[in-house]
Image (cartoon, rainbow, N blue to C red):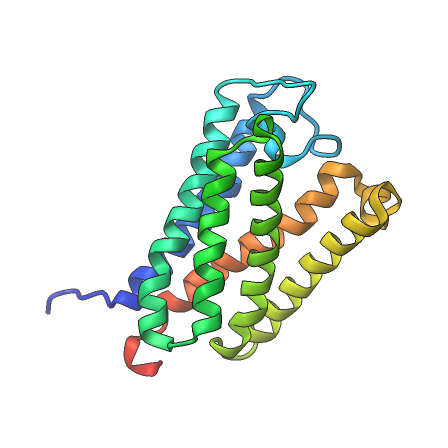
Amino acid sequence: MAFKISNLNLAGALLFVGGLQWPMTVMAAETLFPGYSTRVNDLSDLASTIPPSISLVQPSAIMFNATTFLLGLLVLISTFPIHQAYGQRVFSILLVFMGAAAMGVGIFPGDTGMIHGLAALAAFVTFSLSAIAAYRLEKRPLNYISAIIGVFSLLVLFFAFYMGEASPFWQTFGRGGEERFVAYPVVLWIIGFGGYLMGTSSNEC
């Protein structure tokens, strides 16, 4: 009997691989960046620190840009079979913006100024909202977990913007740690959602 993979299974595989390769590559880039601190440094400092103190270290910069761009590209590609299977317009639109924003972060590092900040903000917001919107697609208990992850990431982002250094996450984990509490949960959701789709046949949608 020939092995056949559905479009939805393929979308899940793309999300799983995209989500998995990102933290692994980021951790590798961190080890190759002298003096890098996960407490002090932003994730995007791996590509380039922001003006006026620009610091670009290779191969960390190319690794971060490439892995972030790839994550966005795989999310973008997966959107089409997911929309065909579920027909959830809001979720599909969020995935499109999520993929495009991640690709934007990979294309425009910190030394590009405001455009990088806008791309990063768009990525954080759309990743979190996508995890919440996935509630309508997933079965229990993953739908509850997804919603909690999305709300949590948005909450940390809210504290970061409205409290700055007074944010309890900044105070406890530093600037870099706070950002990771926004980014890593939603990337883990992508991995989980990809695994969920791989285990879901198209005729169940």
State the image coordinates of residue 66 (x, y, percent, origin top left): 43, 34
In front of the other: 35 or 53: 53
Q: Does 171 appear above or below 158? A: above
State the image coordinates of residue 201 (x, y, percent, origin top left): 31, 75
Of the 4 image quadrants, the one containing the C terminus is: bottom left
Which residue is painted at 42% across and 61% down in the image?
194
- Quarter occupied by residue 69: top left
Q: Which residue occupies the extreme right position in the image?
A: 166
- Quarter occupied by residue 144: bottom right
In front of the other: 168 or 16: 168
Q: Does 142 appear above or below 70? A: below
Residue 107 can be seen in this image:
yes
Q: Which residue occupies the extreme front position in the image?
A: 114
Which residue is painted at 50% across and 48% down in the image?
101
Please give the count of numbered marks on the rendered protein. 0
Q: Does 91 appear above or below 181? A: below
Q: Which residue occupies the extreme bottom position in the image?
A: 204
State the image coordinates of residue 28 (x, y, percent, origin top left): 52, 30
Of the 4 image quadrants, the one containing the N terminus is: bottom left
Q: Does 150 appear above or below 74? A: below
Which residue is painted at 56% across and 57% down in the image?
127
Residue 30 can be seen in this image:
no
In the rendered structure, the answer to whether residue 78 lies left or right of residue 51 reads: left
State the image coordinates of residue 155 (x, y, percent, origin top left): 74, 59
Which residue is painted at 16% across and 64% down in the image?
3
